[in-house]
Amino acid sequence: MLDSLTVPGTHPFGGLLTEAIASTRLYIEALSLRTAGVFDELAIRANWYPDSSLIQSAQAETRERDMTPFCLGAQELMQHLRDALVERGLNGWTVELDSVMSARVLVDGAKRLLRVNSRARFRERDVAKLIVHEVEVHAIRSANGQQQSLQIFGTGLPGALETEEGLALLAEERSGTAAPGGGWRQGVVVRAIDWAREMGFRDLFERICEAGGESLAWGISLRLKRGLQEPGKPGVYAKDVVYYKGLKRVRAWLDAGNPVEHLFVGKVGIEHPIQEWLEEGLLELKPVPRSFLSERESAV
């Protein structure tokens, strides 16, 4: 299907679409071959490997423990998410249980679907946290993008993932729902990505245990080795760097005075020329969710 696509070279988004096709092809190859080499190529293309400055920043994070209990099940969270979708006018979106996923909650914008891990447990604070993260960023950015004339803003421009996850974590910060020690835990992930390039599962697990404890080590090791045909050998699925790295980059971008409404035209990245596209009529501004209303007196 990818081979059958013809990209108009003169279109303003021809280059971005060509890049998106190439990235999708590489994902397919990674899922098919599952070798450390193709996962390495995927990470290099997406700029997922942390550099020395990011690793140094991760090492400097202060450890905090979240001692609040896990008291909610998946069914209870599902109802809260359904209510949040309705309250925000996201009609046609649904929430379903899924027993085969590594994350606790995932948003599938193309299907207008939120998936909740049926095995997951949640803290009471997680309800508000996941609403701003999953609904007010992931779902709203997808819904806003689907309303643009070009559908690529709904599916996601190349490079948009880092901004997406950074913005979601920033939404947690701005709404006061971020978990204690979140920066430290994400910092451990960044360091573990660097370690996993040279370590198999067991060595990686033991190294993370030294840094953060056994329960944390198991979850991180699973995520960083998922998909690899030989997890006992060096190699890493490095995508999870986008959370820590994205938060730092999006926070700095907004602190520099850039308008938050540019990030809610759809699934775009901070490196994209949003203002230029707005002036050319290729985009329209869309509403900003309530977790970011403090950025302006009112929504767009």
Image: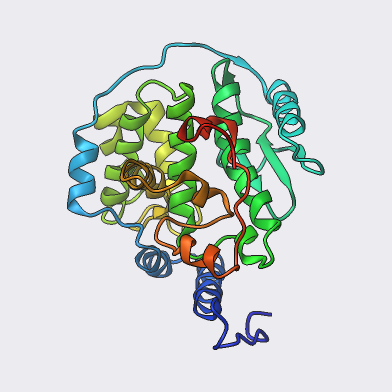
- Color theme of the render: rainbow
**Front residue of 167 and 38:** 167
Is 148 left or right of 183, judged from the image as shown?
Answer: right
Above or below, 163 relative to 282: above
Above or below, 140 relative to 235: above
Q: Quadrant of residue 101?
A: top right
Residue 278 percent location from the top left of the image? 54, 63
Residue 73 percent location from the top left of the image? 67, 20
**Front residue of 185 and 86:** 86
Quarter of the image where the N terminus is located: bottom right
Residue plotted at (58% across, 40% down) = 288
Above or below, 70 relative to 250: above
Residue plotted at (50% across, 71% down) = 23
Residue 113 percent location from the top left of the image? 73, 45
Quarter of the image where the C terminus is located: top right
**Front residue of 146 and 246:** 146
Residue plotted at (52% across, 31% down) = 297
Residue 233 percent location from the top left of the image? 35, 56
Give the total of numbered labels: 0
Instruction: Spot the residue most to the right.
Output: 92
Q: Quadrant of residue 25?
A: bottom right
Residue plotted at (47% across, 11% down) = 68
Q: Quadrant of residue 244?
A: top left
Is 273 left or right of 129, judged from the image as shown?
Answer: left
